Image: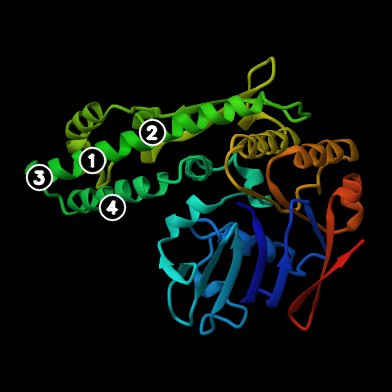
């Protein structure tokens, strides 16, 4: 099952785009602001969630919040679509039948790396937690539904805490739900970390492998035992009441990474080393999905790599069992691909993007 074509209508800067795809990497180049990343964002909308920019549907319409947009794609023998009509939330169609967003995660795995992610190791734990959950979702599609169940129960518990409800009877059922779904979340995250760690060692690479850990701190977010999670929540109620929110559980998880013979923490590494570590994880994520259809989106990935590192990256991409699309400001950034990649030149005139395939 592969991605055979993509079509856009009124999405971001694109009035229209029709793009046929095959196994070859696609190098998309053009000036800053020409609309290259918008193609990647459209592809990221073939995954559950709000895509690589985490944008609201109304912000993705080319003609403003009062307009709509549409994305269509062929995945294997199925026709998939997602759209936002004017003033409405995003909807999903599979073979012209309405489907939940989580169904997209079972059809194809979409992995991306964008410049904003360069701050992964220096940002707040929430950023790394979202990254870990995106990786986990690519490996375990049911992870999204489990996360939704946990968040729903936690919101209800937090409402009780904010309202200073002290009766334990109001909490027990919600804490049982949080414990069951929270334990499943933690098991999934640990499984994803194990899979990525194993995949890092499966291929020759010039990008450093990292030792990954699930950090819990005071939140005990690495606990995968429902009974101990529920017991801890009951014990923590007085403190949670004082804070007005739940202070323990998998929503407090963090992703730790160390690398090299000195076991250097990623947060203390140089900017270049942090970028290389992130690339290593993204490539390992794709490598871990050998039995799944994978689309890899790399936005401006070559901008801060020297020629040797670019060549090494392209060699790894070509060896992956994935369809890859990359963006950059100039065709020269992709010379190391040689004839193995397609080139797409993106230009923008009068606010509208257009694309032309080049040699």
Residue, disc 2: 186
The residue that mark 3 highlights is: 166
Q: What residue sits 43% from the left and 77% below the top?
A: 88
Residue neighbourhood size for the residue with mark 4, other residues' Cα within 10 Å, grouped as few (<14), some (14–19), many (≥20):
some
Q: Distance between the residues labelled 4 and 2?
A: 17 Å
CB under 8 Å between discs 1 and 2: no
The residue at the point 59 percent across, 70 percent down is 72
| Residue 127 appears in the figure | no
Q: Residues within 10 Å of mark 2 (few under 14, many from 20)?
A: many
> Could you tell me which secondary element the residue under label 3 belongs to?
loop
Q: Earlier in the sequence, mark 1 or mark 3?
A: 3
Sequence order check, earlier mark of 2 and 3: 3
Which image quarter is the C terminus in? bottom right
- Mark 1 surroundings within 10 Å by alpha-carbon count, few (fewer than 14), some (14 through 19), many (20 or more): many
- Are discs 4 and 2 less than 8 Å apart at CB? no
Q: Residue 152 carries which label?
A: 4
Element at badge 2? helix
Q: Residue at x 45, y 28 (%)?
A: 215
Q: Position of residue 44 (x, y in %)?
A: 59, 58
Spatial CA distance of label 2 from label 3 is: 28 Å
Could you tell which of marks 4 and 1 lies nearer the N-terminus?
4
Residue behind mark 1:
240
């Amino acid at each position: 099952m592969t991605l055979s074509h993509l079509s856009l209508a009124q999405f971001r800067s694109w009035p229209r785009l029709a793009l046929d795809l095959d196994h070859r990497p696609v190098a998309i180049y053009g000036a800053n602001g020409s609309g290259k990343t918008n193609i990647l964002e459209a592809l990221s909308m073939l995954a559950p969630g709000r895509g690589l920019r985490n944008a609201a549907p109304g912000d993705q319409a080319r003609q403003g919040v009062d307009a709509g947009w549409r994305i269509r794609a062929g995945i294997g023998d199925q026709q998939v679509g997602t759209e936002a009509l004017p003033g409405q939330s995003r909807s999903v169609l599979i073979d012209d039948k309405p489907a939940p967003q989580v169904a997209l995660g079972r059809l194809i795995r979409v992995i991306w790396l964008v410049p904003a992610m360069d701050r992964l190791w220096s940002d707040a734990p929430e950023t790394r937690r979202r990254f870990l959950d995106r990786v986990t979702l690519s490996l375990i599609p049911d992870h999204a539904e489990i996360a939704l169940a946990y968040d729903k129960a936690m919101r209800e518990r937090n409402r009780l805490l904010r309202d200073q409800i002290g009766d334990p009877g109001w909490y027990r059922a919600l804490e049982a739900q949080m414990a069951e779904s929270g334990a499943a979340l933690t098991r999934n995250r640990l499984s994803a970390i194990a899979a990525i760690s194993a995949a890092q060692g499966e291929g020759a690479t010039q990008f450093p492998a990292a030792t990954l850990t699930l950090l819990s701190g005071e939140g005990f977010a690495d606990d995968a035992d429902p009974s101990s999670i529920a017991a801890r929540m009951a014990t923590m109620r007085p403190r949670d009441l004082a804070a007005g929110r739940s202070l323990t559980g998998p929503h407090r998880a963090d992703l730790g990474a160390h690398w090299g013979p000195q076991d250097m923490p990623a947060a203390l590494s140089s900017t270049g080393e942090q970028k290389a570590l992130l690339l290593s994880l993204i490539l390992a994520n794709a490598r871990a999905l050998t039995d799944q259809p994978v689309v890899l989106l790399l936005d401006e990935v070559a901008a801060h790599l020297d020629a040797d590192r670019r060549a090494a990256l392209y060699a790894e991409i070509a060896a992956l069992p994935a369809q890859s699309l990359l963006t950059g400001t100039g065709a020269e950034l992709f010379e190391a691909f040689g004839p193995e990649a397609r080139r797409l030149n993106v230009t923008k005139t009068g606010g509208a993007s257009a694309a032309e395939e080049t040699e």
